[in-house]
Amino acid sequence: MQLRMIRTNLLNLPEIKMPPGYRLRTYQENDNWHWANIINSSFGGDRTDADTREQIVDRPEFEPTGLFFSTYQDQPVGTACAWKWNGADEKEVGQLHMVGVMPEHSGYRLGKWVSLAVLYYHRQQGFKCAVLGTDDFRLPAIKTYLNLDFMPIYVEDDQPERWQVIFEKLKLPFISDSVDQVRTALSENIITKIY
């Protein structure tokens, strides 16, 4: 099972500062192939336009204004999707979903900027918090999420040990399960949704 992280509020978001030559925009009709290409480059696989439609665009959770792309010379090179945690009717818990950047454009913090665009979007839509799922080996992404004030939450018995290894690899002090912080910051209704 993927690791889970939460940002308990969407206040005090840092300013988006795209690097020179890069821009940020939302989904356009011809972006299905671009999304598939970025995700294939980031995660592996051979997704196609049809996969983009099936996995993203045709889903009830999809909003075109919530799928962000970083572009270089008008070509999409990074992406992140604003999703709804428990389906299309969700109004409180947003999800940062499918963050990817073309490897040749790494080092410009594009993952941070598209992720931050999603958080701003969730805030504008009235969401209270944001959740994400990630994998143990995605260390640069996890570091980005931590820098955006996401915290680990444990949803499986093996996750404390997995998080300990991750923090050691990142050479960061270990942050244990943030359940007490989460319970203080969020209503019981929201907590039930995320755990």
Image (cartoon, rainbow, N blue to C red):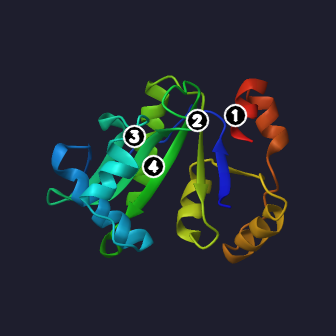
The image quadrant where one finds the C terminus is top right
In the picture of the structure, the residue carrying the numbered disc 1 is 193
Crowding near pointer 4: few (<14 within 10 Å), some, many (20+)?
many
Q: Position of residue 186 (x, y in %)?
A: 73, 28
17 vs 26, left or right, is right
Q: Which label sits on residue 86?
A: 2
Check if mark 2's residue and mark 1's residue have beta carbons within 8 Å: yes
Residue under the image location 44 percent in, 26 percent down: 124
User: Nearer the viewer's eye, disc 4 or disc 2?
Assistant: 2
Residue under the image location 38 percent in, 59 percent down: 110
In the picture of the structure, the residue carrying the numbered disc 4 is 115
Label 1 sits on a secondary structure element that is helix
Q: Quadrant of residue 82?
A: top left
Q: Which label sits on residue 20?
A: none
**Type of residue at label 1?**
Lys
Q: Quadrant of residue 185?
A: top right
Crowding near pointer 2: few (<14 within 10 Å), some, many (20+)?
some
Q: Which numbered disc flags the more N-terminal residue, 4 or 2?
A: 2
Q: Which numbered disc flags the more N-terminal residue, 4 or 3?
A: 3
